[in-house]
Amino acid sequence: MEDPYHAYIRRLEPRSPGTGILAGRTVAIKDNISTAGVPTTCGSRILEGYVPPYDARAVELVRDAGGAINGKTNMDEFGMGTTTENSGFGPTLNPRDTTRVPGGSSGGSAAAVAAGLADLALGTDTGGSIRCPAAFCGIVGLKPTYGRVSRYGLVAYANSLETIGPMGRSVGDVSTLLRVIGQPDPRDTTMRGTPYAHDPVPDVAGRRVGVPDEFFGEGVDPRVAATVRAAIETLASLGAEVVPVSMPSMACALAAYYVTCTSEASSNLARYDGVRYGPAVETARPWHDAFTLVRSAHFGPEVRRRILLGTFALSSGYYGKYYGKAQTARANVSADYARLFREVDVLAGPTMPTVAFRLGELADPLSMYLADILTVPANLAGVPAISVPCGTVDGLPVGLQLTGRAFDDETVIDIAAAYEAEVAA
Ligand code: GLN
């Protein structure tokens, strides 16, 4: 099959061992997830030619379940972006409208699934990178609870925020893939909770669905807001109790996210120095010169920007002013969720404030960052969140986001399944 959307950086001949719950199903893998013997670039020129000697735990589990891995998908460099335009290998196009971006940073995975090039895909979500492209391409994507899927073999961008997660064309498919990857791994010491062993129960009767005002704030396109409110009405018609709530910590969530993720990135990406990882400089030079040359030549502009921002935020004179404050704001987000989840079972709202952007539309970095406002809170708190298609605006898909309690991915899946079953009926 052709790949006119540039969903893949590298396609692979699918080889399935033929048994297990993924037998006969093709699975695309985001290119920041390690695959033994297969190049893994993270969408970056600095990793061109890098071949990991081992599989990520999630990849190992997909293979064990009989999944046929059919390629490595395009992404924003190291996961830094919301459109997949920051890839070092050129952008991916949205299969629903090729003048538009697929969302990011797991845009290749979403496009592969939306176009039918793969049955399922693994993405990663640091601040929305599974849910955003799922919403923009009209598929289902889940960011699992932090700690439920092993990060072993995931190339780190911002390790306290990110997780691997499933993408598919239905809630059932996403649940099946989570069963496969949501298994213990002693090599990731941040793993907690019980393995995911759930089958979706499409039922929302008696569930309390909180709707924070802040999820429908100023930047949200009114047509997207109306589409999502209609989806919430559908949940009410199925017996859910819809409860208006408030989440004041949203005011500082985006700033907290960007200070935290750039700080962690500045540390995690120090390994690309031309010695440990990255191409070596040809002639002998002092360490600082060689380091600067390699990184200037092979990192893209967004990655360089974030390393600079993060290094600044962690510097001795400013640590308290930026990093320290961001951690306070992060704790406030977690406290808000804890309070809200005593009252309600899930929170509902739009996944993204708009439909998919035109290619090149978000030229300045700040407007791209602002598009993440509705997805980053779940990463700051480590709670599960799913995006499920809930209609269109001008023919472009809109995602309903459902966020749940930590380690209660099951409820999020069940409510999404109930919604999906109702609209398919
Ligand atoms: N758009 C966000 C960022 O650029 C989220 C990316 C992600 O989840 N990897 O950081």
Image (cartoon, rainbow, N blue to C red):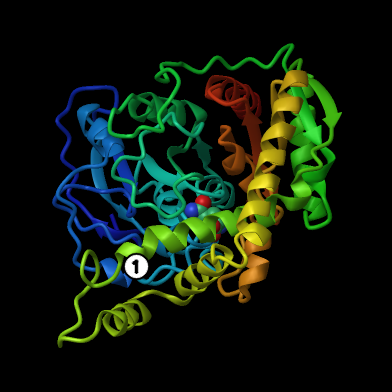
Q: Residue at x 39, y 46 (%)?
A: 116
Q: Position of residue 121 (x, y in %)?
A: 38, 42
Q: In the rendered view, would you say 334 is above or below 377?
A: above
User: Could you say which quadrant of the image residue 396 lies in?
Assistant: bottom right
Q: Which residue lies under the disc numbered 1?
A: 44
Whether ligand 1 has any atom under 8 Å from the Cβ at mark 1 is answered as: no
Q: Position of residue 130 (x, y in %)?
A: 50, 46
Q: Position of residue 211 (x, y in %)?
A: 79, 33
In front here: 169 or 324?
324
Q: Residues within 10 Å of mark 1 (few under 14, many from 20)?
A: many
As helix, strand or loop, the secondary structure at mark 1 comes to loop
In front here: 272 or 209?
272
In front here: 316 or 261?
316
Q: Residue at x 29, y 61 (%)?
A: 41
Q: Residue at x 30, y 63 (%)?
A: 271
Q: Is residue 98 left or right of residue 336?
A: left
Q: Is residue 396 left or right of residue 344?
A: left
